[in-house]
């Protein structure tokens, strides 16, 4: 069974048709990379998957997204966003909350835990999953804003993982990070795919090639090509994919 099925998905903002009839099947426990030039609709596609796009009153969505065969549009949006977590381009921890409280807030609001001991264990588990525990375990009370950019992004990943999602969406999560922090995030994603389905939007083709099991190329809101990452980069079937990969546009 696929983790996600996107079926003839269309998204419009007013008169702008941003996502144009995209259909995708995304297997379980893979890194699925989505690449394309700026303005091609990649971020909008992610927001449509977990229903964040609906928060914009100008947005209109049709088509379907199925999470393990169940339409997300027939589910409570809050449950969808819990099960399909999202990490954004710029690290966005709650700056006035501690490292601990950043991770603990979601489980508290969703009543995941019954007592402080359970919450402590969950926070530690999420920080370990995000490869951050060893760096912060002695300063959990510090403000999240005191962390470096790379640490803040891993904290955002830990915050999403604490809600025990099925799928993790990442919208260019390393674009604001230095090469060392980028390498840590990429290594983390390769580890996390053992337990989660990961969809990453990236403008770095090398990143898609390094960590993607599958890659989709989107141009002007349309799905141009999708396949095994090696095939996409070494033997693209569409001339537009080849042109993008070889740097002739984008």
Image (cartoon, grey):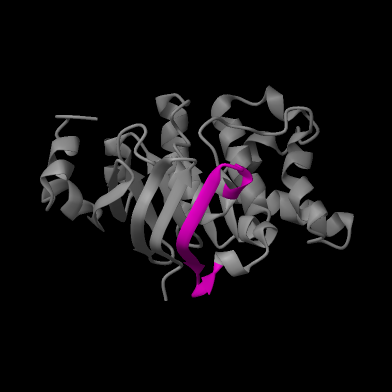
Q: Classify 187 as above or below 28.
A: above
Question: Which is the main secondary structure of the residues drawn in magenta?
Answer: strand
Does the stretch in magenta take in 176? no
Does the stretch in magenta take in 63? yes
Q: Is residue 109 left or right of residue 204?
A: right
Q: Classify 131 as above or below 193.
A: above
Where are the magenta residues, as a range?
Answer: 54-71
Query: Which residue is farthest right?
Result: 115
Q: Quadrant of residue 22?
A: bottom left
Q: Quadrant of residue 140?
A: top right
Point 78% across, 46% down: residue: 105
Point 14% across, 29% down: residue: 248
Q: Quadrant of residue 125?
A: bottom right
Give percent across and percent down for residue 40. Answer: 34, 38
Give percent across and percent down for residue 41. Answer: 39, 41
Q: Nearer the viewer, residue 234 or 249?
A: 249
Q: How many marks?
A: 0
- The quarter in which the C terminus is drawn is top left
- The quarter in which the N terminus is drawn is bottom left
Point 46% across, 67% down: residue: 3
Is residue 169 in view? no
Is residue 112 in view? yes
Q: Classify 126 as above or below 58.
A: below
Give percent across and percent down for residue 235. Answer: 10, 51
């Amino acid at each position: 069974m696929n983790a996600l099925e996107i079926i003839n998905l269309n998204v419009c903002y007013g008169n702008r048709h941003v996502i144009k009839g995209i259909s995708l099947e995304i297997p379980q426990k893979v890194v699925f990379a989505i690449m394309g030039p700026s303005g091609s609709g990649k971020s909008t596609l992610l927001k449509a998957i977990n229903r964040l796009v609906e928060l914009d009153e100008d947005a209109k969505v049709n088509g379907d997204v199925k999470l393990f065969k169940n339409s997300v549009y027939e589910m409570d949006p809050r449950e969808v966003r819990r099960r399909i977590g999202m990490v954004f381009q710029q690290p966005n921890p709650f700056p006035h909350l501690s490292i601990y409280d950043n991770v603990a807030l979601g489980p508290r609001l969703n009543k995941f835990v019954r007592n402080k001991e359970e919450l402590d264990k969950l926070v530690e588990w999420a920080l370990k999953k995000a490869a951050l525990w060893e760096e912060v375990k002695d300063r959990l009370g510090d403000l999240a804003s005191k962390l470096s950019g790379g640490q803040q992004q891993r904290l955002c990943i830990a915050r999403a993982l604490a809600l025990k999602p099925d799928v993790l969406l990442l919208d260019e999560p390393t674009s604001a990070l230095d090469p060392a922090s980028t390498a840590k995030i990429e290594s983390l994603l390769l580890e996390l795919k053992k337990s989660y389905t990961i969809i990453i939007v990236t403008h770095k083709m090398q990143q898609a090639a390094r960590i993607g099991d599958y890659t989709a190329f989107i141009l002007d809101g349309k799905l141009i090509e999708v396949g095994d990452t090696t095939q996409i980069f070494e033997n693209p079937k569409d001339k537009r994919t080849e042109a993008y990969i070889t740097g002739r546009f984008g």
